[in-house]
Amino acid sequence: MAKDYNSMEDSNRSSNRNIHELSDPSRRIVLKGGLGSALGGLLAPLAGTLAGCATMAGDGSLLGFKSVPLSSADKLTVPEGYIAEVIAAWGEPVGLSGDSPAFKTDASNTAAEQEAQMGMHHDGIHFFAQDGSKTGLLVMNHEYTDDGLLHPDGMKTWTAAKVHKAQAAHGVSVIEVEQKDGKWQMVRPSPWARRITARTPMQVTGPAAGHALLRTAADPSGTRVLGTFNNCASGITPWGTYLTSEENFINYFNGPDQPNAHERRWGLRKGGAGYRWHEHDERFDATRHPNEPNRFGWVVEIDPFNPSSTPVKRTALGRAAHEGATVAVTRDQRAVVYSGEDSRFEYIYKFVSRDRIKPGGFRENAQLLDHGTLYVARFDADGTGRWIALVHGQGPLTPANSFADQGEVLIKTRQASDLLGATKMDRPEWIAVDKDGWAYCTLTNNASRGTSGQPGVDAANPRANNTMGNIIRWKDEGDFDGTRFRWNHFVMAGDPANERAEAKGNANGDAFGCPDGLWVDGRGVLWVQLDMSTSAMGKGDLAKLGNNAMLAADVRTGEVRRFLVGPAGCEITGATATPDGRTMFVNIQHPGETASERTSPDQPRGISNWPDFRPDGRPRSATVVIRKADGGVIGT
C-alpha cells in the first residue's frame, strides 16, 4: 500500500449505521497473536502432495523450517538451509529489443531509459510457467515512486522530464526468467519483455465504458485511457492473464479548493499527495479535467504472452482503491473475483461472472469480466454475512440517489456501498483462497477505529485503535457465487505475550503486526507479508517487532512461523512460486524508505543501502529468488 500521505483515507463519511455496534466483538475470534491452539477442528486437514514431494514436517506440520528471529538489521534473513538471491532490481533492463543502458547508481537514467527498465517499488507478482519450472515470465506491479531516489536531486527542481520519468517508473513489468546452471537469471533480450507505464494506452470495457463521467476532451469516447499507476496487489485468471489493480490513484490528482460531494468521497484534494504531476501533465489537474480521476481505480487485465496487446480496464469489477483481484472458480466454471479496498472504513467486494470460462485462453474469454454482478460484503455479528448486489434500480441505487445507470453505480462504487449498508472495514487489503474454499483478507490496521467521530468496534473489526491489524476469513455458502457466508477471525496480529491468558500456549506463535500481502501455495500454506509503516516502526505497539517480515501459517492448526525478515525500511509484498514449489519469488519494496522520501535526496543511504551496498549507490526495490539448498519444496 502507499504510505502515510494517503488522501483517500477516512473519506467514508456515510451515515449508515454500524451494524455490529451492540455485538461482543471477541466472540468471533479464532486465534490471537498468531496462536493456533484455539482453532480446533474448524478446518478439515488439507490434502496432499506437491509434485510427488512430502508436504509435512516430522511433527505433522506443514511448516518444516525453524523460525528466523526478529531483526532490525539492513539485510535479508531466511531460514537455515535456504538460499536467497536478488534479481530484477529497480532500473535493470527488462530485455526489450534495443534495450536501455544499465541502472546508473546516481539515478541519472533518462525517462526513455526508465521506460525500458524495471519500475520502482515492486509489488504484486506472478510466475507464468513456460517450460515446467525452469523457465517462465515474471509479471509484477510497481506501486509508486520515491522521487528522492528516482532523480539525482530529488524534487529540488521539478521538470516535465522528471514527471515523465516518474510515470515511466510506475505500472507493470513483464520479464522472462530462467534457471541456468543452478541459478535464476533474467533472459535478455526476450520476445515477451514489456513495460506498461502511466502513459501506456488502455481500453475501457464493461458497463461504464463510454459513460459521460469517463469522457474527456482528449478522449470524447470515454473508452481510451492513458496509463495505470499505484498498482498494488495483483491476481491471475484461469485463462492465463494478469490482473493489476489501481489502488491510491487519487493521490496523483490536483483537486479544487472546494471539491464536490463525489470528489470528497474519493479523497480528492488540492495538491494531491505531492506527486506534482499536474504541474507538467495537465490531465492530472482535476480542476481542468474533472472526469480524469474517474478513469482510474479499476482492475486492469493484461495478456503477458502478447506484448502487443492493449491492457483492458474492466469496469464491471467496480471502481475502488483496489488492493488486488483474487480469482476463484465455481463448480459450473464461472469466475469469481474478490477484492479489498485499502483505505480505512472501506469495503470488501466480490464479482461473479455471468458466463462460464471457455477453453482457449484469453482469446475465448476476452469479454468474460465485462458481464456479471458486483457485490459488497456485510458481516453480521452472529458469524454470518451477506453479499449485497450493486445493481442499478435495486434498493436505493436509483436516479433519485444520483445513480442514473449501472455505469454510474460502478463509477461511484463507494457511494453505492454506503447506501447499501456494507460493513466498514479496517483497511481490507490482499485476499487469498485456500484449498477448502475459505477466503482470507488482511485488515492491515486502523488507528482511527473508535476515535472521536469515527465508527467504533464491531464484530468484524473488534479493536479500537487497531495498530496491529488482523486477518478475517469467510466461506461462501454452497459455492463461491453464494450470496450468504459464514466468517471468523483467523488471527489477531500482535505479540502473543500481550494477549488474553487463554490464548497463550503456542511457542511457535510468532509476533507480528500489520499483515498485508497474502498468498496460498500449492501445498495449502498461507504466506503472510507485513507492512508496518516506516514512520511507525520501533514505536508504540510495534516497538519490538523489528523490520517487516514474511510468515507462513498452517491453516489447519493456525501455527505461524516467521520465514523471512527484510532489510531496513522495506515492505515485504508479493509472492509466487514455480509449479514444482522449489523456487519462490518475493518482492522487497522501498528499502530505505523515509518520511520525506520524495523531497530529500541528500542521504539516499541513510536508512538502507540494500541490495547493492555500493558506497555511491542507493537502495533499490528488487525481486528475491528463494530456494532450499537441498533442492526441496519451499517451506517443508
Image (cartoon, helix red, strand yellow):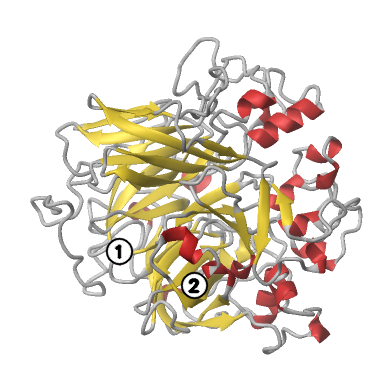
Q: Is residue 222 above or below residue 114?
A: below
Percent position of residue 9, x then y: 68, 56
Q: Label for residue 503? A: 1
**Disc with the residue nearer the chain's start (2 vs 1):** 2
Mark 1: which amino acid? Answer: Ala
Q: Is residue 204 left or right of residue 494?
A: right
Percent position of residue 524, x then y: 26, 59
The residue sitting at 56% across, 17% down in the picture is: 101
Please name whichever residue, 419 or 501, is drawn nearer the observer in this view of the structure.
419
Tag 1: Cα neighbours inside 10 Å, few (<14), some, or many (≥20)? some
Q: Is residue 245 above or below residue 79?
A: below
Q: Which element type, helix, strand or loop, lies under badge 2?
A: loop
The residue sitting at 70% across, 80% down in the picture is: 419
Please, which residue is most extreme toward the top here? 615
Percent position of residue 145, x then y: 64, 35
Q: Which element type, helix, strand or loop, lies under badge 1?
A: helix
